Amino acid sequence: MSISYEENRNAKPLNKAMMLWFMQNLIDSEADLTSPLLDVASANLAGLPPTAIVTAGIDPLRSDGETLAMKLCEAGVAVEHRNYQGATHEFFGLTGAVQAARDAQAFIASAQRAVFGERVT
């Protein structure tokens, strides 16, 4: 388990105990934990398109996102990563109430426009 699992062991809405429950109910054996379907950072990441990653500071999954960003960079993939320090897991969809969600969505939209170009209507 990564550092963010310990830092956010009691966070809401997602915490370490919940993540352990999800994993116990997802895998058939410990060997499943090494599958690139679950451990994406261990997969061959070379040749992937430019990637934007959003993480939340109060989230047990934050370190996983940071690791993925680092591994993508090591594989030669253009990656932008932004962490929203005071945000919790699931903040991204709360644009009506959380400024960080609006900022994160603007960041992702900008990254997508950079890759796909502006849409002409």
Image (cartoon, rainbow, N blue to C red):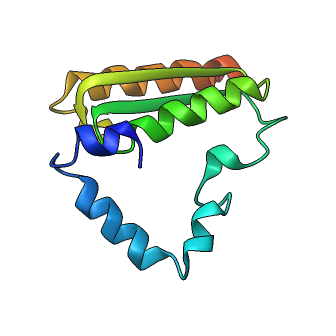
Q: Is residue 31 above or below residue 119?
A: below
Could you tell me which residue is drawn at 32 percent across and 45 percent down? 5
Q: Is residue 11 visible?
A: yes
Q: Which of these two is toward me, 62 or 100?
A: 62
Q: Position of residue 113 (x, y in %)?
A: 62, 21
* Left or right position of 6 against 69: left
Q: Is residue 69 above or below residue 30?
A: above
* Left or right position of 75 against 55: right
Q: Which of these two is toward me, 71 or 56?
A: 71
Could you tell me which residue is drawn at 55 percent across and 79 percent down? 29
* Left or right position of 51 against 90: right
Q: Where is residue 102, by image quadrant?
A: top left
Could you tell me which residue is drawn at 27 percent across and 22 percent down? 85
Q: Is residue 41 above or below residue 87?
A: below
Q: Position of residue 47 (x, y in %)?
A: 84, 35
Q: Where is residue 17, by image quadrant?
A: bottom left
Q: Residue furthest right?
A: 47
Quadrant where the C terminus is found in the figure: top right
Q: Is residue 89 visible?
A: no
Q: Which of these two is toward me, 81 or 30?
A: 30
Could you tell me which residue is drawn at 29 percent across and 40 percent down? 59
State the count of labels. Answer: 0
* Left or right position of 60 against 25: left
Q: Position of residue 98 (x, y in %)?
A: 19, 28
